[in-house]
Amino acid sequence: MHISFLLHNAYGIGGTIRTTFNLAEALAARHDVEIVSVFRHRDEPTLGAPAGVTLKHLVDLRRHSPGYDGDHPDYQAPARVFPRGDGRWKQYSRLTDTRIAAHLRTVEADVVVGTRPGLNVHIARQTRRGPVRVGQEHLTLDSHGYRLRREIGFRYPLLDAVTTVTEADARSYRTRLKLPGVRIDAVPNSVPAPTVAPADSTAKWVVAAGRLTKVKRYDLLVEAFAKVVAARPDWRLRIYGSGDATGNERDALRALIEQRGLHNHVHLMGPANPLEPEWVKGSVAAVTSRLESFGMTIVEAMRCGLPVVSTDCPHGPREIIEDGVDGRLVPVGDADAVAEALLGLIQDDELRRRAGQAALAASRRFDPVRIAERHEALFAELVARGSGAASRGRGRDALHRARGAVLDAAYTARYRAADVLRKGKRA
C-alpha cells in the first residue's frame, strides 16, 4: 500500500509527531509511506527523520529558504477550511487552504491519514475520490469545544475510519456522534524499545516528564513529594519538561519548591531529548495529570523498566497501567494518595523491583511493530472495501457535502457579524 500521513509540523517536538514517526517508520518496512508536513520551519526534523519514509512539506517558513512562504499575501488571510474550533487555527491561512487542497486533489495514495481534527476536516472535504480517508484522534472528543465537535459531526461522515488512542474515547465517538458507515477503532500510540539498559530499581529518584502546564498538576506532585521527603529524605524528584512562552508555570513551581523547603529534593531539569537516559536514572515514575488523552510518558517510563504512579484521569492511564501490578492508579487531585502510592514503592525494594519488571514486560504491547500491524490490518480492510464514496454511495456523500456547505455559510455569516461587532466596539 501507499500510505500518506498529513501532519501539522514534522519539524517540531510533540507526542503526535513522535507517534506518527514511530508508526510511519514501522509501516515503511512493508509499504510505501510518506509524511506530508503542512509547515516546515527548520532544515531537519528535531526528532530525526523516520527511516524509509518520504518527508515533504507544503508551506516553507524557513527565512533563508528560496521557497520562503512567510511573505505570501495569502499567508496573512485567515483559513476558511481549517476549522476555527481547532486550537491551531490561527497558524492556518488561505495559503494553507490552497496548498492542502492541491495536495489532496492529486495525492497518489491508497490511504490518506490525518493526525488532528483540523487536518481530518481537510481530508474529508478535499481528498480526491479513490483513496481511503482515515482521521486519527490524538486528543479526546471531550477535550474539544462545542464548535469543533459540531464541525466533526458534520465533516467526519465523509471519512472511512476514525482511530482513537483509547477505547474510552472510541466509545465516545460511537455513542455521541452520528457517523454512519464510519469505522471507529481504538489503536494506542506506539513507543519503540529503548536504546539503553532498563532501570535496575536501585536509584533513589522519582522521575516525571511532560510540558510544564497546569493540566499536568506538577504542583500536586510537589505537594505529594513533600510528604515523601518527610518519611524518606534520601529520595529525590526530577521533573523534565519545558514550560510555555511566559514561564509562569515554571516560576510558580519554583516558588512552591522553595516554600516547601524542597530545593535539595525537587529539581526542575528542563527539556531532555532523548529522554530514555533520564528515565533509567530513576526507579519510579510519577504522573499527576488531571487529563491525559493517552499517556505517552507512562509508556515511555514503563519501557525503561519503571513502575508508574499515576492519577486515574481520563482517558489513558487505566488502559495502560494494571493497578498494583506494574504501577498504581490514584484519585485525581489527591496529594495524600499520590504520596502513599509513591511511598509504597519506595519503602519496599522487592515490590519496586517486581513492579518494574512487570512494567517492562507489559509495555512491549506498545512496540511500533505491533501497533503498525493493527493499523495495517485496518487499512487493508478499508482498501479492500473501497473508499467512502463507493462503499456508502454517492447520494450520502453528496448529502454530507451539502450539509457541510450549509454549515460553511452559517459560520461565515456568524464570523462576519462578530467582525462588525468588534470593529464597532473599537470605534
Image (cartoon, rainbow, N blue to C red):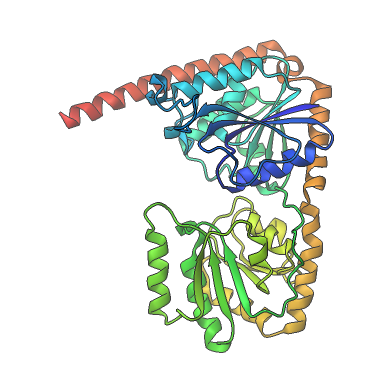
Q: Where residue 261 sits: x, y (%)?
A: 42, 82
Q: Is residue 257 left or right of residue 42?
A: left
Question: Residue 186, can we see it?
Answer: no
Image quadrant where one finds the N terminus = top right
Closer-to-camera residue (222/48)? 48
Q: Nearer the viewer, residue 289 or 238?
A: 238
Left or right: where 114 falls relative to 223: right
Residue 173 versus residue 358 in the image, above or below: above
Where on the picture, by quarter, is residue 139? top right
Count of number-bearing discs: 0
Q: Looking at this rendering, what residue extends furthest in the left direction?
A: 427
Residue 317: x, y in percent?
Answer: 66, 59
Residue at the image position 62 percent from the left and 12 percent from the top? 398
At a point 57% along the width and 59% down the height, the residue shown is: 272
* Residue 24 in the image, given as x and y percentages of width and height: 73, 38
**Residue 168 image position (x, y, % from top left):** 67, 48
Q: Nearer the viewer, residue 9 or 391?
A: 9
- Quadrant that contains the C terminus: top left
- Asked if one can make out residue 224 in the rendered structure from this viewpoint, the answer is yes
